[in-house]
Amino acid sequence: MQTLRASTFGLVPSQLSAAILDIIDTLTEAGYEAYIVGGGVRDLLLGLHPKDFDAVTNATPNQIRDVFGKRCRIIGRRFELAHVYSGRDMIEVATFRAPPRKPATTAAGMITRDNVWGTIQQDFSRRDFTINALYYQPRKGQILDFCRGMDDIESEQIKFLGEPLQRFEEDPVRMLRVLRFAAKLEFKIDPSIIKVMTPALAKLLLEVSPHRLYDESQKMFTGGYLAPLMHLMIKHQVWSVLFADAPPAMTPFIQRAADNTDIRIRSGKSINPAFFYAVLMWQPFLDRVHQLEAAGMPHTEAWTQAGVDVMRRQQKRTAIPRYAEVFIREIWELQPRLIEPRARQIPSLSIHPRFRAGFDFLYLREKSGDPVTMGMGQWWHDYQELDNDQREKTINQLNRQQLRAHRKKNDARAADERVVVQMDVQPIQLLPVEDDKPRRRRRTRQRDERQESEQPSQGLDGIEMISTDGDRPDTSSIDVNLPSEPDARQSSDRGRAPRSQSRERGGRQSEDRPLPRRRRRPRDLSTVFMGPY
């Protein structure tokens, strides 16, 4: 064990928060040993700003609760801890651990219960990494180093305390912690650790509680080093175990979202970790939509059902809370409404509670090269910077563009349908027709025949013969040269019009002179009974 002077490495109590100093001083005044341990000490030695501080003491959880009273809450069953509140801050206080008297592990070697109290010399061996096994007492100005952890910090290496395979079997979450520290600190992973990190070992994460894996994923998403961490997860076969359906590949959309998340965290802006879950699950969501539509489900129902199915599968790996699931699905459901908005719905969309998250999602898709957005990400970006008058003009212009595009789409669809019809219809061969005259309807033919039968017979050269006796016409008063019998027969045949010509003449007359309309006779409404009122 090495006892190092803290001031030699630039550690002073003023770098610590008031909450952790309050916990350390209160336990020391109660007669217990108390140290700051873990990542807080490591980050201070590296010149980083620690996210939080953890304390360790020789007081048991019940004794800690007796010291702090209502400010303390004991949590955990496998690994019992005390959460102590100081103002708005919460400090996690653990008790020195000793090796278990009886092995309490699963068949895979994972520890199921670790609540055996011990001394500080026994506690350091229960730590996972050498760089996290440094104990700092701020009031004494001392750093206790039991395993040469300071040397590993200076050489920028991540090493295990003990056999790597055994430490992974005891707690598979340590695989995620190794990758997280390597991405955050930019340290090299010890070759003995890389050697045992196989796909078969990564499957041990399936035995970990989904709630604990969700908490670990929140630490990964909000650490400010998400982009390099995603590459390490793919390299060491951890991605496919943690995320159910997301393909293990850094697509341009995921890469841009990870970079944007890291930039926001480094600039001090807030983020919602569920947003990155929406990015990771976007491609599985689209694939599920296509499957449901291919099965005959309408597009709107498929869009909703796909979100339910994808989130249900992911919750078996990481227990996403209900509020986070609703947030993710609302982002997905806003995408088609933002890409093809109706003009009258644009003002209400801009004040939607999830508009900002949906717009950021759409804008990242467009910047990553997604052609489906049709430039609407930039349109919404410019729309938010306009005043009310300019917004109204922009909406009208967008409405005209949508109508024009819709008209072109319909014209193209109609043209395609005509082409398909012309290709399907077989050419018809026309048979030769003796008479090219248009055929008349049956009623027209019957009317022509009736008019022909009622038409009076005509004599020579078309002169009408009127009989005075009733039987034979009188021709004595007509001065004509009578032909011989053959000529008379020819003349009689000439005087009688052919049947087809009479039909044609009768049809022509009926076409020139249409039938008169039937006049409507007005009714006497005084005699009509209208019924009771």
Image (cartoon, helix red, strand yellow):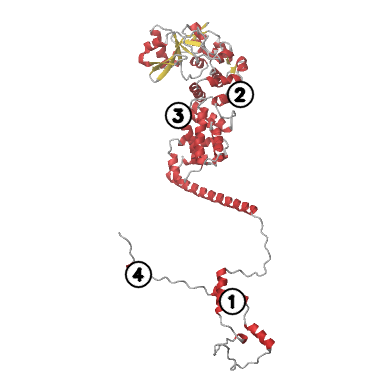
Which secondary structure lies at badge 2?
Answer: helix
Q: CA distance from mark 2 to mark 4?
A: 97 Å
Q: Which residue is mark 1?
A: 505
Q: CA distance from mark 2 to mark 3?
A: 31 Å
Q: Quadrant of residue 480?
A: bottom right
Q: Which residue is mark 3?
A: 322
Residue 359 visible: no
Between discs 2 and 3, the one toward the N terminus: 2
Location of residue 510 with respect to 395 vertically, above or below: below
62 or 84: which is nearer to us?
A: 62
Q: Residues within 10 Å of mark 2 (few under 14, many from 20)?
A: few
Q: CA distance from mark 1 to mark 2?
A: 96 Å
Q: Which residue is mark 4?
A: 524
Location of residue 419 with respect to 311 vertically, above or below: below
Disc number placed over residue 235 in the picture, else none: 2
Between discs 1 and 2, the one toward the N terminus: 2
Which secondary structure lies at badge 3?
Answer: helix
Which mark is in front, 1 or 3?
1
Which mark is in front, 1 or 2?
1
Q: Position of residue 227 (x, y in %)?
A: 56, 26
**Relative to 248, is 32 on the left or the right?**
left
Q: Position of residue 399 (x, y in %)?
A: 49, 48
Q: CA distance from mark 4 to mark 1?
A: 44 Å
